[in-house]
Amino acid sequence: EIGTGEAIYATALKHGLKFKKLEREHRVIDGIERMTNNFPLLWIDTNRCQPMLLAWSSYHREWIEKLQCYSEVPVHDWASHFADAGRYLSKVIESGADKESGISLEKWRQLKEQYA
């Protein structure tokens, strides 16, 4: 980090933030499917999250006319980073990384019902 000369990770640890390293996905399509399955667990502020929702709805694969099918991987464009964030959020939900904070998947569902 330019301001302190200290790594952002080290600064976060100093302030009590804990991290769990997620394994990198080998197939993007697996993450997309997981995100689709976990989407009902989310509650989203549609006013504050418009850019994210627009990006998620714009994330797409390219149509290959010659082969008459879609490419296997999504187009890498402005929506990709939002989609990656969603995929990794769903990985956190599914992996149980939330256990360290004391929030189980069942509690997550209860909170969603309470605030939805």
Image: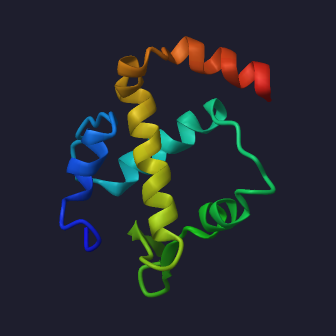
Residue 24 in sight from this viewpoint: no
Residue 29 visible, this orientation = yes
Instruction: Residue at 62% x, 30% y: name it.
Output: 41
Number of callouts: 0
Q: How is the image coloured?
A: rainbow
Q: Quadrant of residue 18?
A: top left
Q: Where is residue 71 in the image (x, y as percent from the top left)?
A: 41, 72
Q: Which of 15 and 113 is in front in this view?
A: 15
In-image side of 39 versus 24 (left or right): right
What residue do we see at 67% from left, 67% from top?
Answer: 51
Query: Closest to the observer: 9 or 44?
Result: 9
Out of 5 and 55, give the one closest to the viewer. Answer: 5
Query: Which quadrant is home to the C terminus?
Result: top right
Residue that sits furthest to the bottom in the current view: 66
50 is higher (above) or lower (below) than 96:
below
Q: Which residue is drawn at 26% across and 57% down?
A: 8
30 displayed left or right of 43 = left
Residue at figure coordinates x 81%, y 56% from the top left: 47
Q: Residue 73 location, x and y as percent?
A: 37, 67
Q: Quadrant of residue 16?
A: top left
